[in-house]
Image (cartoon, rainbow, N blue to C red):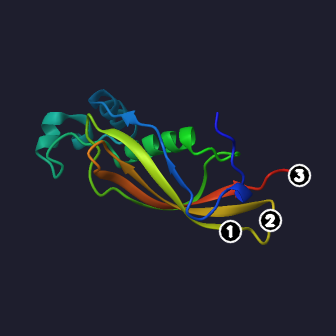
Amino acid sequence: MTKPLWLEDINVGDRFTTGTYEVTAKAIYEFADEWDPQPFHLSEQAAEETFFNGLAASGWHTAAITMKLLVGDVPIATGIIGASIQLAWPSPTRPGDVLHVELEVTDVRRSKSNPDRGFLTTTYKTINQHGEVRQQATGNLLVFTRPE
């Protein structure tokens, strides 16, 4: 098990690469049915006639997979707590994609008003097995300092 990281353990330039997650058509349909019921997420045939030219996972499904991967492999002691995010989906996630996330810490700052915590600025990409970026983001994470 990886040692949990507190604010003071994390530095600008630190990088994390997660394990992988394989996306299936069944998972795309199930997520879309519950959360984003649009034709290009619900039917291969309907999706062929859209901008996507084939079945595409919801961006929110890709975001949820990204979160699962980050939580599993970025060992922040008190969890991945988002404060803000800038998010883009440059290409659609497809059935058969095997996704992983690459994250880099670009800023670390301690809160002046609450010295028991601080913020990390991170950039990360969700990438498939062919190197295609399916999601990219800049996020600010709330991270706590090690308890005394």
Q: Secondary structure at mark 1?
A: strand
Q: Residue at x 31, y 34 (%)?
A: 28
Q: Residue at x 50, y 39 (%)?
A: 68
Q: Nearer the viewer, residue 140 or 30?
A: 140
Give the mark, 2 or 1, whose residue is nearer the N terminus. 1
Q: Secondary structure at mark 3?
A: loop
Quarter of the image for residue 54 reads top left
Q: Which residue is mark 2?
A: 114
Q: Residue at x 12, y 42 (%)?
A: 48
Q: Nearer the viewer, residue 41 or 5?
A: 5
Q: Which amino acid, by three-letter code, is at mark 1? A: Arg
Structural crowding at the residue carrying mark 3, measured as other residues with C-alpha within 10 Å and reported as few (<14), some (14–19) or many (≥20): few
Q: Which residue is mark 3?
A: 148
Q: Which residue is mark 1?
A: 109
Q: Secondary structure at mark 2?
A: loop
Structural crowding at the residue carrying mark 1, measured as other residues with C-alpha within 10 Å and reported as few (<14), some (14–19) or many (≥20): some
In the shown orientation, is residue 82 left or right of residue 57? right
Name, please, the residue furthest toward the top.
26
